[in-house]
């Protein structure tokens, strides 16, 4: 059965905070650290353990903080280092932990390293980045940025191009240069010595480049990401060095974010004996539905694909690796809008998805607002969108002769701002997020979907999360037990078994708007959790989810 090594980061649950959109304490419309501090009791009440803070460092905000201009300081719009220390102490006092988001594949173009680097061909920071000559007046190769357009930007001052896999204001750092790595390790130590509990490492598989910089032969962006940008020749050498030089000295957790990490290479990042990372956020299920040109070029997929991926990943990790389980974050649509039904079965499907992320094998990661059932937003005007990805792709669409109306339809479903509208605290102005005009409009459904509502209703999505979080804590089978999908005739039924020497659980979920029969013998089991009251034994109502425990 199971011989997993035990670890706190397998047993605890992560809650991701996107600080810009969580709670504003000053009235400037931007969420901040004191806002988070004011909500610590709320977070404690929910019952999560580890807070992942999206970046709070100094940044020109071209990509909302994923473009860092000073890794050692807090952006004034979020507060001060004293506020940070207070937040960390507040979390620790309540028995929670804090992990920081570190972005080391690239910096901001306003980082002093880059400012010096671009100033001449010959300076001590030139090799902190990738500078190359063009090819007959064109960029060095055909690489495309994740956010549209070429991944190379020409800089007139030195008449060379620099590489940026994201926006042109996010130049890629050159890990080949030992001085870059040393600088990064010092930054990691600075934050660890403050007493934080770990890191979420942004786009970690991209840090080692294929230095030949050959053209990508692939048409689909996702293939280029997997085979050309990610998993470069020295990626494991670098991560292992970071582990040996810094990480291993601390009792922390590390989770690598991994576009391009396939199940075939996943274990190399997280195998227990590798000396690299504790777990990864692989994006296979999140990239389902992305066509050749990415998210704004959608293709169909079904629950069959999702179920297959979860089984394949579990098998690939086996007893020696670990992943995080999540269905949304600040880069993707809201889980209830994407994987549930945010209209007729809003509450039912939100609860079903909660049961799913808290019972699959891996460390669950809950994104802020999921516990309220927050949904995608459909802004009427492109001017209401803030995300650089949406803005850049809008330009590309117009250049290709499409209309803003056509593009907006895609953004409503796939845009990242769906997840970035302010947290809905109550039904007062601006959803109680801020006294001033928020940096991005609130979702108009805050009048009915908000924290005050769910806290006042013991049958709400919030209390379902709370119940499940408590349940998971006291049933280690749901953490370490084996995982096995129980294949059902209906594609929309997702059923699996979690088992160890002590217990056997069955989780059965109907991911559809119709009634479905299931074909699993539950006579020796008792029903532990159910999201809808329904007494029929072998029949699940639309979006019904059940968890059984063998007697
Ligand atoms: O959302 C995506 C693009 O549509 C993903 O491909 C995303 O860019 C990828 O997962 C990397 O995301 C991370 O790095 C980006 C940053 O914009 C994202 O917010 C971050 O999560 C660059 O730092």
Image (cartoon, helix red, strand yellow):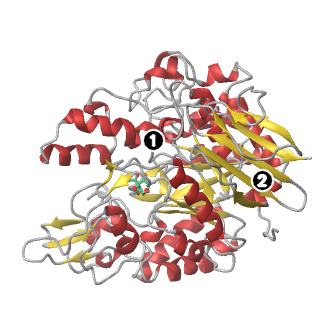
- Determine crowd level at label 2: few under 14, some 14-19, many 20+ residues with C-alpha closer than 10 A: many
- Residue 221 to residue 307: above or below: below
Quarter containing ligand 1? bottom left
N-terminal-most mark, 1 or 2 = 1
Give the image quarter of residue 45.
top right
Residue 117 rendering spot, x and y as whole percentages: 27, 71
Q: In the rendered image, which residue does mark 1 sit on? A: 333
Q: Is residue 26 left or right of residue 245?
A: left
Q: Is residue 252 left or right of residue 75?
A: right
State yes or no: Cβ of the residue under disc 1 lies below 8 Å from any atom of ligand 1: no
> Which image quadrant: the N terminus?
bottom right
User: Which residue is rendered at x = 56% and y = 71% of the image?
Assistant: 266
| Side (left or right) of 432 relative to 76 | right
Observer-nearest of 141 and 300: 300
Local crowd at mark 1 within 10 Å, few (<14), some, or many (≥20)?
Answer: many
Q: Which label was assigned to residue 478?
A: 2
**Which quadrant holds residue 145?**
bottom left
Q: Nearer the viewer, residue 327 or 55?
A: 327
The residue under the point 45% across, 46% down is 332
Q: Residue at x 51, y 43 (%)?
A: 18
Residue at mark 1 to residue at mark 2: CA–CA distance:
27 Å
235 w.r.t. 358: above or below = below
């Amino acid at each position: 059965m199971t011989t997993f090594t035990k670890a706190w980061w397998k047993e605890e649950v992560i809650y991701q905070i996107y600080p810009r959109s969580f709670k504003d304490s000053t009235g400037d419309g931007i969420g901040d650290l004191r806002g988070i501090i004011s909500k610590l009791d709320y977070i404690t009440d929910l019952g999560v353990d580890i807070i992942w803070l999206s970046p709070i460092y100094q940044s020109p905000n071209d990509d909302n903080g994923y473009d860092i201009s000073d890794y050692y300081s807090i952006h004034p719009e979020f507060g001060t280092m004293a506020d940070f220390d207070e937040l960390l102490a507040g979390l620790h006092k309540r028995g929670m932990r804090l992990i920081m988001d570190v972005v080391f594949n690239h910096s901001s173009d306003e980082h002093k390293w880059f400012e010096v680097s671009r100033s001449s061909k010959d300076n001590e920071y030139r090799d902190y980045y990738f500078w190359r000559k063009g090819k007959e007046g064109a960029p060095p190769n055909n690489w495309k940025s994740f956010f549209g357009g070429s991944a190379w930007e020409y800089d007139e001052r030195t008449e060379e191009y620099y590489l940026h896999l994201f926006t042109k204001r996010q130049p890629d750092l050159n890990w080949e240069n030992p001085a870059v790595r040393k600088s990064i390790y010092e930054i990691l130590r600075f934050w660890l010595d403050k007493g934080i509990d770990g890191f979420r490492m942004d786009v970690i598989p991209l840090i080692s480049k294929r230095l030949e910089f050959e053209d990508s032969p692939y048409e689909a962006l996702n293939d280029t990401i997997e085979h050309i940008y990610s998993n470069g020749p020295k990626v494991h050498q670098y991560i292992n060095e970071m582990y040996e030089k810094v990480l291993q000295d601390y009792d922390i957790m590390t989770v690598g974010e991994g576009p391009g990490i396939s199940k075939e290479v996943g274990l190399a990042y997280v195998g227990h004996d590798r000396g690299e990372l504790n777990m990864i956020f692989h994006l296979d299920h999140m990239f389902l539905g992305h066509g050749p040109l990415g998210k704004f070029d959608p293709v169909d997929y079904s629950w069959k694909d999702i179920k297959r991926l979860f089984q394949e990943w579990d098998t690939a990790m086996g007893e020696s690796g670990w992943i995080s389980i999540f269905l949304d974050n600040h880069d993707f649509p809201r889980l209830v809008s994407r994987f549930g039904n945010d209209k007729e079965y809003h509450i039912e499907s939100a609860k079903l998805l909660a049961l799913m992320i808290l019972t699959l094998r891996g460390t669950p990661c809950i994104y802020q607002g999921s516990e309220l059932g927050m949904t995608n937003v459909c802004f009427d005007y492109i001017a209401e969108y803030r995300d650089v990805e949406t803005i850049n792709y809008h330009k590309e669409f117009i250049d290709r002769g499409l209309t803003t109306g056509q593009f907006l339809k895609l953004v409503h479903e796939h845009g990242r701002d769906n997840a970035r509208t302010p947290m809905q605290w109550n039904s007062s102005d601006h959803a109680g997020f801020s006294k001033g005009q928020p940096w991005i409009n609130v979702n108009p459904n805050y009048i009915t979907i908000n924290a005050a509502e769910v806290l006042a209703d013991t049958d709400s999505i919030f209390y379902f999360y709370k119940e499940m979080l408590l349940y998971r804590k006291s049933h280690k089978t749901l953490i370490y037990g084996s995982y096995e999908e129980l294949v059902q005739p209906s594609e929309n039924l997702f059923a699996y078994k979690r088992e160890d020497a002590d217990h056997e659980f069955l989780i059965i979920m109907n991911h559809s708007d119709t009634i479905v029969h299931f074909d699993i013998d539950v006579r020796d089991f008792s029903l532990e959790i159910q999201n809808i009251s329904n007494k029929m034994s072998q029949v699940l109502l639309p979006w019904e989810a059940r968890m059984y425990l063998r007697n």
